[in-house]
Amino acid sequence: MKIDIVSVFPEYFEVLNLSLLGKAQEKGLVEVTAHNLRDWTHDVHHSVDDTPVGGGAGMVMKPEVWSECLDELLHLEPTTVTCDSTADADDTASADAAESAESATEIAANADTVPATDRPVLIFPNPSAPLFTQQDATELSHANHLLFGCGRYEGYDARIPQYYRAQGVDVREYSIGDYVLNGGEVAVSVMLEAITRLLPGFMGNAASIVEESYTGENALLEHRQYTKPADWRGIKVPDVLLSGDHAKVDRFRRDEALAKTNKLRPDLIEALDCSKLDKADRKTLMALGWEVSGAHPRQR
Ligand code: 6GU
């Protein structure tokens, strides 16, 4: 996987040479290059931003600098496109996706879900975009070339993603959570860690990925974990985990995952597929106050 990152603080990404991602680079699984956006400026001040059209606080990143940079990294020739700047207000979805979408959430979602492996994916971190999820990480782990564009200041000119989408590039915008960061750099390192650890050969233990929270069709928060000693400072490991009865251990963990998810993330329970729940799952959920006869659990 080839990963290009464009930022006005490329040094920030030196952390990617550490730890497992550093090892993956040494092994040749991934090739990460951080570029300085200012290398594509021509003025003496190397300016990358300008005041917002229409007024307002802060500065907005200029499209011309970004396009020189992105054209080069994506091997595209500059062109002129005919685009209606008002038509694309939801901005992350194509007209087709908006037409077939059933809900506002779907309209706001990124248009291309599964990236074609041979097509580069251009990703802009943006606090006003759909949330980046484990599913996005899984999908993006199948791409051959990812290009991240880090915005700073109040953001970037909206025509940048619009233009590259019109060029046929798979363009995505993601937020990593409901809080505001100073720029996209931290968000890119979060997304990169979530994506690259899914690459085949990245981690020693593939099974540990399968059992993690937010993975698979029936995503639940993970059960609690213990190691030895069985009694530590007066706190005991639950007896059943010491029983050696694997079926009982699995059931205990599954019930704990259901109870914990019910308490902390009922939205994840609501998203479960009832047809994938076994008898014991249903019994546990019913005891927690859920109706499990429909397609998805419903709170009673
Ligand atoms: Cl992707 N960028 C910035 N600047 N702030 C954020 C974010 C992204 N996600 C959450 N907050």
Image: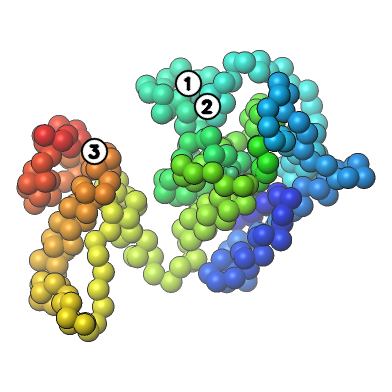
At numbered mark 3, what does the secondary structure look like: helix, strand or loop? Answer: helix
At numbered mark 1, what does the secondary structure look like: helix, strand or loop? Answer: helix
Q: Which residue is depicted at the point 52% across and 58% down?
A: 193
Is residue 235 depicted above or below 255 in this figure? below
- Please identify the residue farthest to the right as the structure is shown: 44
Q: Quadrant of residue 22?
A: bottom right
Front residue of this view, candidates 55 and 205: 55
Residue for badge 2: 93
* Cα distance between the residues tagged 1 and 3: 24 Å
Q: x and y percent of residue 154 in the render?
A: 65, 37
Residue for badge 3: 270
Q: x and y percent of residue 265 in the render?
A: 28, 46
- Which amino acid does the dot numbered 2 rest on? Ala
Disc 2 to disc 1: CB gap under 8 Å: yes
Q: Is residue 262 visible?
A: yes
Q: x and y percent of residue 258 in the render?
A: 19, 52
Q: What kind of colouring is applied to the model shown?
A: rainbow
